[in-house]
Image: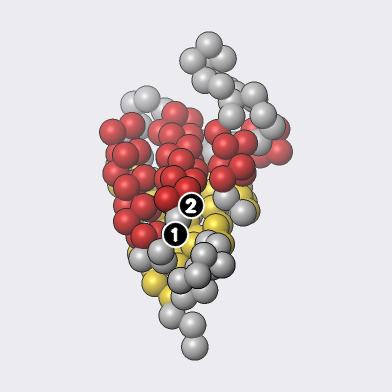
Amino acid sequence: MEHINRIKLEIPCRSENEAIARNIAAIFSASQDPTIEELTEIKTAVSEAVSNAVLYAYDDDEEGSIYLEMEATGSGRITIVVEDRGRGIENVQKAMEPLYTTGDSRERSGMGFTVMESFMDKVQVESSPGKGTRVTLIKSLDRTNGF
């Protein structure tokens, strides 16, 4: 039977907690012996997912949370879920297009999902207006490095 490790966290939806989420993902993933490049890719994808939640999930006057779930298998597959229970995304397909943003285009590049997709093996986005967004990031670590 394959060994599976899991953790679940709830953190306040604040920009200063992006670094915490990124570092927790790195520490959790480190147990799977990723390369430095793989670790950087995981951290970057988590940063983008958490940043999206911070920027878009809740109204400015609303206190919200970000829920993180992480799972690692003995075969080197890492799954990280970043979820909020905020306003949701009206059109997920449109939101995942490069350069699309609902924020100020001078401040936001609209490349968050594109970055996530370029660094992870699979990115799934589920969202319902008024109910929140769930981003699932999946990475299969390269096990051909001789270890």
Question: Could you tell me how far apart the alpha carbons at marks 2 and 1 are, in whole angstroms?
Answer: 6 Å
User: 107 or 64: which is nearer to us?
Assistant: 107
Look at 62% across and 54% down and name the residue there: 121
Q: Is residue 135 left or right of residue 36?
A: right
Q: Position of residue 19 (x, y in %)?
A: 32, 39
Q: Is residue 2 left or right of residue 111?
A: left
Look at 48% across and 37% down and name the residue there: 48
Q: Residues within 10 Å of mark 2 (few under 14, many from 20)?
A: many
Q: Which residue is mark 2?
A: 38
Inspect the image, locate mark 1, and give the three-letter code of the amino acid beneath it: Pro
Q: Position of residue 107 (x, y in %)?
A: 49, 15
Q: Is residue 4 above or below residue 81?
A: below
Q: Is residue 27 left or right of residue 105?
A: left
Q: Is residue 134 above or below residue 88?
A: below
Inspect the image, locate mark 2, and give the three-letter code of the amino acid beneath it: Glu
Residue 70 appears in view: no
- The numbered dot on residue 74 is none
Q: Is residue 119 above or below residue 89?
A: below
Residue 122 appears in view: yes
Q: Position of residue 40 (x, y in %)?
A: 44, 45
Q: Residues within 10 Å of mark 1 (few under 14, many from 20)?
A: some
Disc 1 is placed on an element classified as loop
Residue found at the far bottom of this picture: 1
Q: Are marks 2 and 1 in contact (CB under 8 Å)?
A: yes
Residue found at the far front of this picture: 146
Q: Is residue 16 above or below residue 11?
A: above
Q: Which residue is mark 1?
A: 34
Look at 39% across and 72% down and name the residue there: 5
Q: Position of residue 13 (x, y in %)?
A: 34, 38
User: 19 or 58: which is nearer to us?
Assistant: 19
